[in-house]
Amino acid sequence: MKNRVIIYTDGSCLNNPGPGGYGIVMLFGNLRKEQSKGFRKSTNNRMELLAVVEALRSLKRNDIPVILHTDSSYVVNAINNKWVFGWQKKGFKNKKNPDLWKLFLELYPAFHIEFKWVKAHVGIKENERCDELAKMAAENPTEIDHVYESSDPSLFD
């Protein structure tokens, strides 16, 4: 698509919770950027959400519309159904991953983003690549998810 940034994201976790990783593929015209990172202990939903946060953080401009694809119904439903805004009003009481949702909500207003859910493992090239990146990152973790490892596990899913 012309004049749009197309993003695919995916998260992975081995033995959820366990080593986790995320993968991102970003496309704009002929430009392509891939990124991933692995964490020694996290959860799948944290990695799915962190992939979205990191994708938005890496955008250098906010004046170009973004279409973000993810196979995480957790992320897409929370945003498209506007649940996350209700959670925010209630201080994320009894909600999982409040630290990452707060980071997302700091970034989100600056962009015009359309979130699209894609089915996993059905041959969508860029989604499959994100899955590969996320799994490779989870298999070779280099980072510590400090919030997850130092907090009450009931805060996370």
Image (cartoon, rainbow, N blue to C red):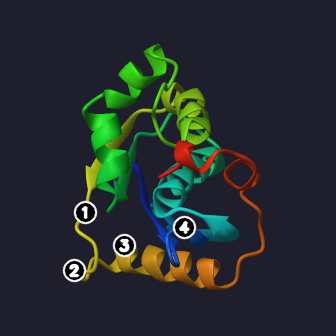
Looking at the picture, which amino acid does disc 3 mark? Asn
Find the distance from the CA under tag 2 to the CA under tag 4: 25 Å
Label 1 CA crowd tier, 10 Å (few <14, some 14–19, many 20+): some
Identify the secondary structure beneath mark 3: helix
Looking at the picture, which amino acid does disc 1 mark? Val
- Whichever of labels 3 and 1 marks the residue nearer the N terminus, that label is 1
Q: Are marks 1 and 2 in contact (CB under 8 Å)?
A: yes
Give above or below for 61 relative to 122.
Answer: above
What residue does disc 4 label? 17
Label 3 CA crowd tier, 10 Å (few <14, some 14–19, many 20+): many
- The outermost residue toward the top is 89
Which is closer to the viewer, label 4 or label 3?
4
Which is closer to the viewer, label 1 or label 4?
4
- Whichever of labels 1 and 4 marks the residue nearer the N terminus, that label is 4
| Residue occupying the point 21% across, 80% down | 122
Find the distance from the CA under tag 4 to the CA under tag 3: 22 Å
- Name the mark on residue 118: 1
Looking at the picture, which amino acid does disc 4 mark? Pro
104 sits left or right of 149 in the view: left
| Residue occupying the point 55% across, 35% down | 98
- Whichever of labels 2 and 3 marks the residue nearer the N terminus, that label is 2
Looking at the picture, which amino acid does disc 2 mark? Val
- Name the mark on residue 122: 2
Q: Position of residue 120 (x, y in %)?
A: 28, 72
- Name the mark on residue 127: 3
